[in-house]
Amino acid sequence: MPPKKVERGKRLTNLIQEHNGVKALIQGQTEEEISARFVVGCDGAHSSTRKILQMPFEGKSEGVSVMLGDVKLKQSPFREYLNLISNKNGLLFVAPFKGEYTRIIVIDLTKQDRHFPSKVDMNTFRASISHVYGESLEIEDPYWLSGLTTSHRHAASYRDGNVLLAGDAAHVHNPVGGQGMNIGFQDAVNIAWKLAYVIKNNFNPTLLDSYQQERKPIAAEIIKKTSRMINVISMNEPWAIQTRNNMMKLLLQRTLLQKKVMKNLSQLTHDYTGTAYSKHILKLTGKPAGVRVPPCLIVTATWENINVYELLRSGECLCLVYGNEHFFRKKQTVLQRAMETFNKECGNILRPVFLLNNESREKLDESENVFIDLYDEAKEKLDLQLYDVLVIRPDAHTLFHTSIRNVEAVKKALNYYFR
Ligand SMILES: Cc1cc2nc3c(=O)[nH]c(=O)nc-3n(C[C@H](O)[C@H](O)[C@H](O)COP(=O)(O)OP(=O)(O)OC[C@H]3O[C@@H](n4cnc5c(N)ncnc54)[C@H](O)[C@@H]3O)c2cc1C
């Protein structure tokens, strides 16, 4: 299907759910009606989709008013990734980006509630920064400036019939750690391949229920952590401020810890190992499912380096079989046929990938499905043993990991996940 264009200046005004699809009413210069099998509402915190569904958006205002912006610092006294200054006047957070810009977030305790400016401009921003920092910082060229009063809210459900919610439409939290965009991306990556499997391969739409099962706990955790953090950040008792500052100083000055915090904030530490499916698989195989697959360099049969992620771009689940040259010489045709039969039975779930261990220095053949783990990266990072089979979802999480001898368990697991 050719990619669709983003059409600006058009607004969703209503949705009508039908037996096997949704009708969307769109208002542009004229009104139009679009029929689709599914609608994903990625329309932000004030989502029309969510309101049309009358989906509860549960949560509350946290009542902390924050000014923030990306600006250039003429002479930066800050050397760390994350810098936190906090005192009785408020809190200042400074994070220099790799380029010329620096993200500055300021909570000025004299500018709360009715004293919070209705519009943040450079003068109000500068004044509050100076008030908290104790001296003026030379800031200029704002890329953007903004002001908000923090809140957190979570949609009661991410799916109602053929309509789904993703990104800020499904969850909002305060800006501690700047995590809103990444969580939305990961929602999108989680739901996109499932929708494709349902629409293109005719899978049962119950597959879409795993979207909420996997993503909602992650949003709930981020909401919990960020609202705890805002409480810590906005404390105004002098002894509490002192204790917090001492701890923050200790923690944030450690580069390793900073890297860990950054990894956590970028949400690369989240995975789906806590779901009922993963626990079921753990019982079946002794290995969890839903583990995030890290980037791994392997080589093609024509000796070109390739990241495992490249293989996921086809949008299929990879069924990676790990073995040595001898094993594949004997078994490749059998394995290929087994997977073809399996795909026929189960509806083209799997793309076979044969990964030879790094003792295999001779080309097996130049098939596009044969790779060599030349640097042992896949073996180490994916914990592969000879004759393992590892099924990786298009969103780079494991669906299943066991020995090839346990093929019946693979079938059972896939039938459980895809019903
Ligand atoms: C000041 C500020 C700073 C932030 N900084 C960071 C940061 O550093 N890092 C980070 O990860 N996140 C940050 N965030 C959060 C991040 O911007 C959001 O989480 C993210 O943009 C959400 O993406 P989204 O696609 O879900 O929604 P949005 O970006 O809000 O996009 C929704 C889109 O839907 C459109 N829309 C709305 N209603 C309709 C309708 N009825 N019909 C058609 N279209 C409609 C809107 O016009 C908009 O284009 C920040 C947010 C704010 C406010």
Image (spheres, rainbow, N blue to C red):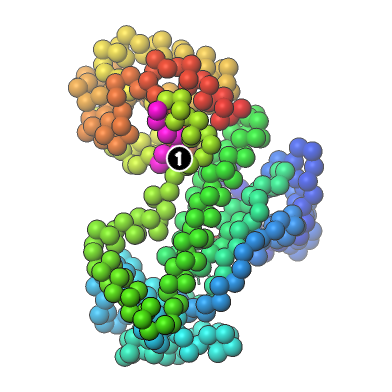
User: Residue 240: x percent and y percent?
Assistant: 38, 78
Residue placed most toward the observer, 241 or 105: 241
> Is residue 295 in sight in this rendering?
yes
Q: Which residues are magenta?
A: 286-292
**Amino acid type of the residue tagged 1 in the rendering:** Thr
- Quick one: 327 or 259, which is closer to the camera? 259
Determine the residue positioned at 47% across, 72% down.
231
Up the image or down, 166 lies above or below 153; here it is above
Q: Residues within 10 Å of mark 1 (few under 14, many from 20)?
A: many
Residue 365: image location, x then y, percent: 31, 17
Mark 1 falls on what kind of element? loop
Q: Which residue has dot 1 on it?
A: 273
Q: Residue at x 34, y 59 (%)?
A: 261
Percent x, y of residue 16: 79, 49
Q: Is residue 288 magenta?
A: yes
381 versus 5 height, above or below: above
Number of dots carrying numbers:
1
Residue 394 left/right relative to 172: left
Q: Would you place residue 216 above or below residue 117 in this image?
A: above
- Please state, as top left, top right, bottom left or bottom right, where the C terminus lies in the image: top right
Place residue 44 in its image quadrant: bottom right
Residue 388 pos. (x, y %): 35, 22
Residue 309 sits inside the magenta stretch: no
Task: State the predominant SS element of the stretch in magenta.
Answer: loop
Query: Along the line of sight, which residue is nearer the eye, 252 or 363?
Result: 252
